[in-house]
Image: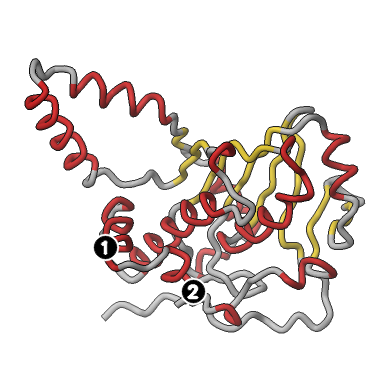
Amino acid sequence: MSEKKTLLVTTTGEPYQPVRLKWAVPSKSYCLQRLKKLECVGLDAETNLLTFWNIAEAKALKLGTSHGMPGGPPSPLDGRLVILGIFRFPDVKSMVLEVRSIARATEIARMLRPLLGASGKLVRARVVNRWFAASELADGLAELDKWLDRKVTVIRWEDAADEMDAFINRGKTPQERQALWAQWHDARRKVDVPLVEDFPCHPEDENDQMGDLANTLNFRFVRASRHWAGEKVTLTEVIEQIVASGFSPSGLVRR
């Protein structure tokens, strides 16, 4: 019998699963002026990057096993400051946030929503669609963080829509096109998400609770948890099962 794996979790107790969020913003100075309003944001003297600390406003974030996450109890913090995420500015019109768990991504995005206002639009998300064993930590967390830039599959919804339209339009009658539509979607059920997935967000459909982002990431969280348990399910199958059960994805995550 193979030895049971130990799940790698963050300091605050969530399964380690790197996420990068990207906003389109008016300017770097626009972001800096607003981020400085948060007491839990500090400046890293070595890298000159804004860093999110687990103090002040950040204490209200729903992280760790106290909110039902399955990663085991968080390590004692002993009063230490914990880096929850790092902000970077790849260009003057973009801001990215890198975090090490899906819960951190969702919670910090919710905190930033009123701060950035309508001018700050969450446009893309990147996630590593797997959990990690503690034994994979041998070369350090910084090395694991590099998974966000390994063999990335960039998703463009318009490409999939064009492909579907071309497939369906092979039908000459409405009945044939309907049958092809069903065939297309049945085939897509068997196509799983890539290991490192970069996909567009829809800021025009987002609400103050970042519900679209939360559901999108939590579906992937549930899939990763089931793969960790040895199940080979696709993301589409996970979504269909959650919808059929009547539970929200966040309800399943915080079990």
Nearer the observer, 84 or 188? 188
Q: Is residue 138 above or below residue 203?
A: below
Q: Is residue 75 left or right of residue 40?
A: left
Measured as percent of width and height from the top left, residue 109 is found at: 66, 53
Q: Is residue 160 left or right of residue 189?
A: right
Q: Is residue 6 left or right of residue 59?
A: left
Earlier sequence position, callout 1 versus callout 2: 1
Say what secondary structure mark 1 lies in.
helix
Between marks 1 and 2, how big is the CA–CA gap? Answer: 18 Å
* Residue depicted at 76% across the width and 36% down the height: 89
Measured as percent of width and height from the top left, residue 10 is found at: 62, 69
Residue under circle 2? 254
Say what secondary structure mark 2 lies in.
loop
Residue under circle 1? 244
Local packing at callout 2 (Cα closer than 10 Å; few below 14, some 14-19, many 20+) is few
Q: Amino acid at mark 1?
A: Ala
Q: Is residue 141 above or below residue 14?
A: above
* Residue depicted at 26% across the width and 26% down the height: 164
Measured as percent of width and height from the top left, residue 63 is found at: 63, 71
Res 111 → quadrant: bottom right
Q: Quarter of the image for the C terminus: give it.
A: bottom left
